[in-house]
Amino acid sequence: MANETSERRHMSKPPLKTISSEVDAWIKATGVRYFDPLTNMAMLTEEVGEVARIMARRYGEQSEKASDKGKDLGEELADVLFVVLCLANQTGTDLHAAWRRRMAAKTKRDKARHAANPKLRRRVAR
Ligand SMILES: [Mg+2]
């Protein structure tokens, strides 16, 4: 039963294709056009920096300022994903196909690697 549901889910439009189309429609309707790829590359760096700020201050050893406390990690990660999807769309990259290839390669490469890593068996002291 679970396999049947899983199969049906995979037969519908893949999530990356769905959100990729959503971003493209949004750009055309609201964004006028894509920023050029190099501008989007800079935007990606900016958005990753916003994620890094939350990680360093909320989960790392930097103190979290009052102005940082309301920031939502999920929304900042979504900003990163949005720009990644823009870059894929505007360069004609099929991110879904690339994702499938990379997951297959990672699975093949790391099949025994992480299971054999003793560092992953102990918690890192904070
Ligand atoms: Mg952001």
Image (cartoon, rainbow, N blue to C red):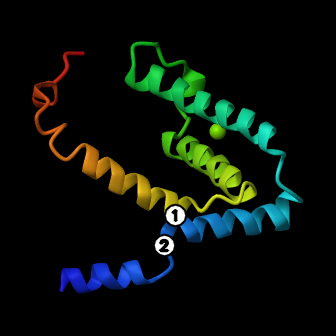
Residue at point 60% right, 43% down?
80
As drawn, the residue found furthest toward the top would be 62
In this picture, is 38 found above or below 91?
above
10 Å crowding of disc 2: few (<14), some (14-19), many (20+): few
Q: Quadrant of residue 20?
A: bottom right
- The answer as to whether callout 1 falls within 8 Å of ligand 1 is no
Which marked residue is nearer to the observer: mark 1 or mark 2? 1
Contact between marks 1 and 2 (CB within 8 A): the answer is yes
Image quarter of the C terminus = top left
Question: In the image, ligand 1 is in what quadrant?
Answer: top right
Q: Nearer the viewer, residue 53 or 5?
A: 5
Quadrant containing the N terminus in the rendered view: bottom left
Number of numbered discs visible in the structure rendering? 2
Q: Amino acid at mark 2?
A: Pro
Q: Position of residue 65 (x, y in %)?
A: 54, 18
Residue 96, which numbered label? 1
Horizontal and vertical percent position of residue 13: 51, 78
Which label sits on residue 14? 2
Residue shown at the point (59%, 65%) measured from the top left: 19
User: Given the image, on which type of amino acid does mark 1 rest?
Assistant: His
At which x and y percent is residue 67?
60, 24
Instruction: Identify the secondary structure beneath mark 2.
Output: loop
* In the image, residue 90 above or below residue 58: below
Residue at point 46%, 13% (across, down): 63
Q: Which quadrant holds residue 119?
A: top left
Q: CA distance from mark 1 to mark 2?
A: 7 Å
| For residue 47, above or below residue 96 | above
The tag on residue 76 is none
